Amino acid sequence: MSVNSNLRNAIRAIEALKRTHDASTALKPLGTPMTDEELRDRAELVEKVIQTRSKLKALRDRSEALRESLERFRRRRAESA
């Protein structure tokens, strides 16, 4: 994966979280009665948030791994110089 595609994926994930935040304000509180459709909508929203957060975590983990790899490379290069 290139840096540009990682950046695009991160931006998409953040935008998706913003959209779900906006959509969550329209949801009824959990204690109130809901129709089957409202329950499905809530479940779909929760699923999207979980998936998006998972993708963001994977991007953060990948970014951290790349940063550590770059640091190791720089140390080895400095040691061999």
Image (spheres, helix red, strand yellow):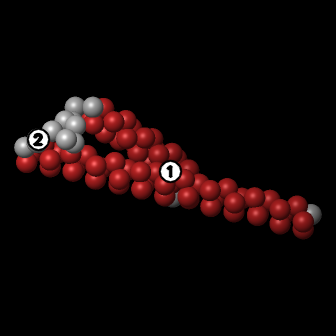
Crowd around label 2: few <14 · some 14–19 · many ≥20 (10 Å): few
**Farthest front residue?**
31
- Residue 73 in picture, x, y percent from top left: 76, 63
Would you identify the image quadrant in which residue 51 lies? bottom left
Crowd around label 1: few <14 · some 14–19 · many ≥20 (10 Å): some
Of the residues shown, which amino acid type is indicated by label 1? Answer: Asn
Of the residues shown, which amino acid type is indicated by label 2? Answer: Pro
- Residue 47 in picture, x, y percent from top left: 28, 53
Q: State the SS at label 2.
A: loop
How far apart, in angstroms, are the residues tagged by discs 1 and 2? 41 Å
Instruction: Using the rendered image of the protein, determine whether residue 5 is visible from the camera's viewpoint.
Output: no
Mark sitting on residue 29: none
Taking depth in this image into account, of 35 and 47 the one nearest to the observer is 35
- Residue 15 in picture, x, y percent from top left: 39, 38
Mark sitting on residue 33: 2
Earlier residue among tags 1 and 2:
1
Q: State the SS at label 1.
A: helix
Disc 1 + disc 2, Cβ < 8 Å: no
* Residue labelled with disc 1: 6
**Farthest right residue?**
81
**Residue in view at x 67 percent, y 56 percent:** 67
Quadrant containing the C terminus in the rendered view:
bottom right
Taking depth in this image into account, of 59 and 6 the one nearest to the observer is 59
**Residue in view at x 21 percent, y 50 percent:** 43
**Residue in view at x 35 percent, y 41 percent:** 16
